[in-house]
Image (tube, rainbow, N blue to C red):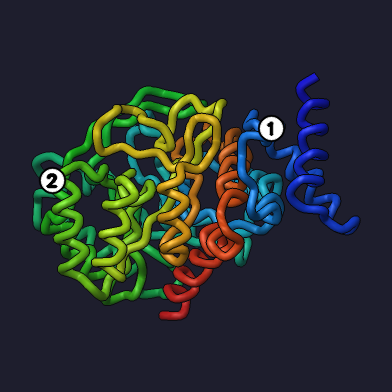
Amino acid sequence: MRRSLVAVALCLFEVAVFTPPAASQPVSAELASIFLRTGVDMTAVQIETPSAATMPLIDAHNHLNANIPAESLIEAMKRAGVESTVLMPRHYRDPGAGGGATDEQALDYSRRYPGRFIPFVGGQRDDLLQGPGRIDNPRNVHFVLREFSDKLGNGEYRGLGEFILVHHAYGAISGGEPGGEVHIRVDHDAMRRIAALAAKQRVPMLFHAEAEEQPAKDAEALIAAFPNTLFIWAHACGRAGADETARRLRSFPNLMCDFGSMSNGPRNQGGYGRAWPRKTPWVHQIQDDAGRILPEMKQLFETFPDRFMIGTDVAHTGQLKTYRYRIDLFRILLMQLAPEAARKIGSENARRVFAKSAARG
């Protein structure tokens, strides 16, 4: 019954808003199927860019664990219409953390499948966790930096990250595993040294920090101190409000925001697109729970179309089954933007950013 209603709604939509030529009918069919798969009510969404249903996308925030074969990633990407994806290895040695990946694994995948994978030198590693003898140990950080520098020297890695700095604990959802509480000062000396290295090697540095009052001030201090470093602030720049993000984008031309796990719809069980894992005054969504873009976010993205990139943030291997759903929700987000913003945020910005880092070699 619901399938029939959606089909009827699609016909009404095409008559009322646009009349595509016969050659574009497959696009309309795929558009309808996206709404069916996600459970988003198409009649409640204002579609401006229907071509977002099929445009090739670049996933600018994704991860790699030791037990994720390249072929599984390729299959998920093909089903979702994703051209290429960033791979940020999770180095954690504890099997319960679901990591165990290596930078060499990410590089191997990118060599075996040229153009499909964008390898990073991973920032999620035991050496950089909070606590005595880890990130607060200058000697330890010195060895990590030397390793980063040696690897970036070959010219094949495209970035550094993700560095987990201010992160709230969460339980297992959607096939994932629990995540821990982390509080590391965003402009910690170790982060400053890594930012300097990123500038020297001409690669972006991607970090995770909730845009709460003090972490946001520290992030601004770090970004201001290294104007030649391109910073990618994960999760829509820490899930800050539209006005605060606009202010930062005006102030810092070396700042970009990714949408890692920020897509949202009626079937979401959690994820950064909702007030999860903790509701605070600093958490802002970009889509409501029905999949509609929030008006202030639409204005933000269309005012700064060159400064945002989508990202699925499949951090745990079991979550790979949700990959297409996450991308489908991003397609619904992009459909609600003006065509230029949809194209840039969907792929062009990521292509530009990571082409620059590739050119350094």
Determine if residue 140 is in view. no
Quarter of the image where the N terminus is located? top right
* Residue 5 pos. (x, y %): 78, 26
Residue occupying image coordinates x 83% and y 26%: 4
In the picture, the disc for residue 304 is none
**Which SS class for mark 2?**
helix
Q: Is residue 19 left or right of residue 218?
A: right
Q: Which residue is mark 2?
A: 214
Q: Which residue in the rendered view is the most extreme toward the top?
A: 1
Q: Which residue is mark 1?
A: 37
Q: Position of residue 272 (x, y in %)?
A: 40, 37
Q: Position of residue 313 (x, y in %)?
A: 46, 44
Kindly identify the amino acid type of the residue bearing the numbered disc 1: Arg
Query: What's under tag 2, amino acid-wise?
Result: Gln
Tell whether 110 sits left or right of 294.
Answer: right
Would residue 175 be found to the left or right of residue 127 on screen? right
**197 and 70: which one is in front?**
197
